[in-house]
Image (tube, rainbow, N blue to C red):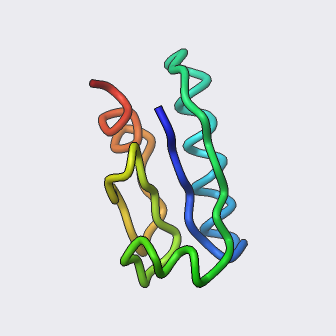
Amino acid sequence: MEIKVLGPGCAKCKKTEKLVQEVIKEAGIDAKVEKVSDMMQIASYGVFGTPSVIVDGQVKCTGKVPKKADILSWLQK
């Protein structure tokens, strides 16, 4: 599973990345998390609000810090 956290490095972006890491660890999910901070790369995903979370190529959240329960639901298949 590939997860991308998109954002320039603001407090909300850092919190989102931390929450994603916590959920992965707590649930024992095997996933690779990548932080994307380049604005051109972020725009290439069609995302214009940050923070954003992309799971296996699908935009799951944009413009807000997601709740842990939401993150877990995105990661369970």
Which quarter of the figure is the C terminus placed in? top left
State the count of labels.
Answer: 0
Q: Position of residue 10 (x, y in %)?
A: 69, 75
Residue 26 sits in quarter: top right
Q: Position of residue 40 (x, y in %)?
A: 58, 83
Q: Is residue 57 left or right of residue 10?
A: left
Q: Position of residue 58 (x, y in %)?
A: 32, 53
Residue at the (54%, 21%) spot, across then down: 30
Of residue 31 and residue 44, the one placed in the foreground of this image is 44
Q: Position of residue 38 (x, y in %)?
A: 67, 76
Q: Is residue 36 left or right of residue 54?
A: right
Residue 56 sits in quarter: top left
Please, is residue 35 above or below residue 56 in the view?
A: below
Q: Residue furthest top?
A: 28
Residue at the (50%, 39%) spot, across then down: 2
Residue at the (66%, 47%) spot, across then down: 18
Residue at the (48%, 62%) spot, across then down: 65
Please, is residue 46 above or below residue 3 in the view?
A: below
Q: Is residue 2 left or right of residue 39?
A: left
